[in-house]
Each structure stands twice: as structure tokens, then as C-alpha cells.
Amino acid sequence: MGRTVNLGRGQIVPYPEPSSPEATAVGKANRRTGTKPEVELRRALHATGLRFRKDLLIRAGGTRTRADVVFPKQRLAVFVDGCFWHVCPEHFHMPKTNLGYWEPKLQANIERDARVSKGLSADGWQVVRCWEHVGVDDAVRVVAAALVGLGHVRAGELLAAASPVVAPPP
Ligand SMILES: [Zn+2]
């Protein structure tokens, strides 16, 4: 057996050898942080006038996690989930090589997401997860709606002012 990767919780799997161009390409195209969708969401939220923390460490419900966008006062944690790493039902494709690496790793990601969401909720946080494929405007609306629901009345006003194209419901 060659190199291995310890995924934690007793899972040790073969490292995807860099001799596989596919694995390398997948890895490069799916970086974990600073991905474009989360940067775009932060920029768009900021442009509406909303203020938040980014990558803030949250300890809650026995878990610790860094959410992409955090509104500490409203206890709202927003994650932008990449379609590959978080196994989007619409866009995820299992790599054709190194299944012994990818399957347990992605399964561990799914389980961690569930654990984090549950831990945050148990401690009074609201969790919003946006798939990276969701358009930034929709993501902003989801976040603003969650904020309004949490008593951040300005969020609705700021969103309305920033997005005059949003039509009222018929
Ligand atoms: Zn997707």
C-alpha cells in the first residue's frame, strides 16, 4: 500500500496518486476555501449594506466550524457548499478513478455537514446552506429572508433598495 490519508474518525484511505491527472484536476477545481461563489456572495451581501463576519469560528453544540458568512448577533451561519465537495444532487459526479479515496472522503464530508448543522441548530443558530450553483442574487435573497425572520428588519429594506428588479409577489 502506498501513501494514505487519515480522514479522522478511524478512516484511513489510499492517497489519490498524483499520477492520476483526473484526481489532480478534480482537486484543483474544487478548492475548499476562497471559492468564487462564496466570494461573490460576500461581495453581493456587502454591496447591499449588510455587515457580517467571514470565516468566523463558531463553537456550538459540541462542534466547531467556520461558516463562510456569519451574522453573530442574529446567530445566522451561512455556508456556500461546493457541488463537488458537498455532493450536490444535481451536479455531483463521482470521479472515475481513486474511488477508494473519494467515496469515504465525500461520505465523511456529508456526515460532517450534517453534524455541523445539527450542532449549530441545537445551540440556537440558524443555518443556511447555499449550493454553489445557486445564483448569487438568489443566495442574497435567501440570506436576507433568513435575517428578516431573525428580527433583522433592516435586511429586507437593504435588499429592496439594492435590488429594485425584485418584483413583488403577484
Ligand atoms: Zn450543484
Image (cartoon, helix red, strand yellow):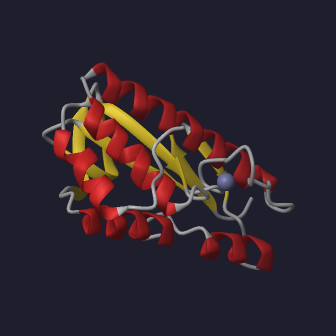
Name the residue rendered at 49%, 37% in the picture.
Answer: 112
Quadrant into which the N terminus falls: bottom right
How many discs appear?
0
Q: Is residue 76 left or right of residue 1?
A: left
Q: Is residue 89 left or right of residue 45?
A: right
Name the residue rendered at 27%, 45% in the picture.
Answer: 156
Answer whether residue 166 is visible to the viewer in this image: yes
Where residue 73 appears, x then y in whole percent?
Answer: 13, 39
- Compared with residue 127, is residue 137 higher up or lower down, i.e. above or below? below
Which of the pair 71/116 is nearer the observer? 71
Where residue 56 appears, x then y in whole percent?
Answer: 23, 53
Quarter of image, ligand 1? bottom right
- Compared with residue 51, is residue 149 higher up or lower down, i.e. above or below? above
Which of the pair 72/139 is nearer the observer? 139
- Compared with residue 59, is residue 156 higher up or lower down, i.e. above or below? below
- Compared with residue 148, is residue 82 higher up or lower down, i.e. above or below? below
Which of the pair 70/165 is nearer the observer? 165
Q: In the image as oriented, which residue stretches furthest toward the front?
A: 170
Where residue 49 appears, x then y in whole percent?
Answer: 20, 62
Answer whether residue 9 is visible to the viewer in this image: no
